Image: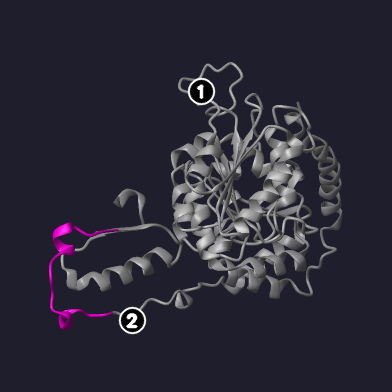
Amino acid sequence: MAPCTKWSERVYDPARIPEYINRAFQTAMSGKPGPVYLDFPGDVLYRKVEEDTIVWPEPWDPAKRSRPQAGSEQVSEIIAMLEQAERPVIVSGSGIQWSGAETAMQDFVETAGIPFYTTPQSRGVIPEDHEYCYLTARSAAFREADLIFVLGTRMNYVIGHAAPPRFNADAKIVRIDVDPLELESSPRKLDLGVVGDAKVVLEQLTAAAKGRLSPSSFQSWRERLGGSNASKVAEQEKVLSNSSEPIHPLRLCKEIRDFLDRDAILVVDGQEILNFGRQSIPTFAPRHRMNSGCFGTMGVGLPMGLGAKVASPDKQVIVLHGDGSFGMNAMEMDTAARHNIPVTCVISMNGGWTADPDKVKPGRDLGYKRYDKMAEALGAHGEYVEKPEDIRGALERAREANKAGKPALVNVLTDANAGATTTAFTRYAT
């Protein structure tokens, strides 16, 4: 496990178990958060020790973790670069979530008037209906920006390594990250790299920006992005309202979007439906959206949803699955039913792995399974939907089942030929 974790260790003495567990949590949550692995051999676990030989460490308090700040010269340099810029953008990642920097980021955005974008893992840090959020103008923003802030995220394939042609080759890049190794490994030359905690550095920048920048600083830039965004949103609504049968996955996404509470927790897992959901369902609160992440670990959707509901029992929790990804951990519906965890699982059932109209991919065909019948057999509420106009009613009945303490599964037959890509959104119309 050492190559894929921050820290990996084995316990040889049961008296040291508290010490090792404390260190594991401390390592996992300090600096750049990441996974750790602690191995407990069976013979060690069953060995008896005298209780008075155990040293109980003071539990690690995450509130006391180190929060490095930027140097005053670095803060001044960033503000100077902003004063010279005409088209800045912010690209933020999960570091904003881990740092609890959502308020600090919004304050900075509003003080300086900078358009912002997030990676899929950090959606909702600022509500996505904020006036400085132009989701459908992302490509234009990246391509034309002359100053790019990379905040708390890896410069990996998710953002195209911040490299041309997706990003302006002549743009200056400022990167802020708590991990110095991340800065050193940047795939593109940085004009300024700052080792610091996102929350602390953003607060420093906001304080320094007052009196030197204002929301009007980049008004013409925002108006350009806003105009592009508004026209595309109108086009998208037509596509999302698709009434064809089999149901287009974007129509399913629209129905879920309109059904969700503003503070709902949404989990999306799959391939086609993950891409469709990313482009059509907004998020308005931090740490309220989860997906399979950069490693593409399909199948995690329902387990994540159950964990989210147990952690936040008063929140609406919707899991949007592809039929392939649901099948990987389908029996977690039994867990939900046995333990009365009232989540709603919605399946986009296109009958296979990915959309493949020619059906040439080996093992692609899964068939159209009645997962709703399976849910009913396990004690959950189940529904099967074939018509787009019936989706909302099924979701409402699922909500009522949830209120009664039962999990629900809505199995929706979707178009097997509707393939999601990263091309222009309006090309998804059929």
Residue 96 as seen in the image, left or right of residue 26:
right
Residue 136 as seen in the image, left or right of residue 44:
right
In this rendered view, identify the residue nearer to me: 1 or 116. Answer: 1
In this rendered view, identify the residue nearer to me: 236 or 246. Answer: 246
- The residue depicted at 65 percent of the width and 34 percent of the height is 422
Q: For mark 2, does the 10 Å Cα neighbourhood hold few (<14), some (14 to 19), or many (20 or more) residues? A: few
- The residue depicted at 35 percent of the width and 54 percent of the height is 5
Residue 296 as seen in the image, left or right of residue 103:
left
Residue 194 visible, this orientation: no
In the image, residue 345 lies in the stretch drawn in magenta: no
Q: Is residue 82 above or below residue 242?
A: below
Residues tagged 2 and 1 counted as in contact (Cβ below 8 A)? no
Where residue 330 appears, x then y in whole percent?
Answer: 46, 42
Residue 417 visible, this orientation: yes
Q: Is residue 192 above or below residue 74?
A: above
Amino acid type of disc 2? Glu
In the image, residue 43 lies in the stretch drawn in magenta: yes
- The segment highlighted magenta reads 38-56
Which residue carries the number 2 mark? 58
Which residue carries the number 1 mark? 365
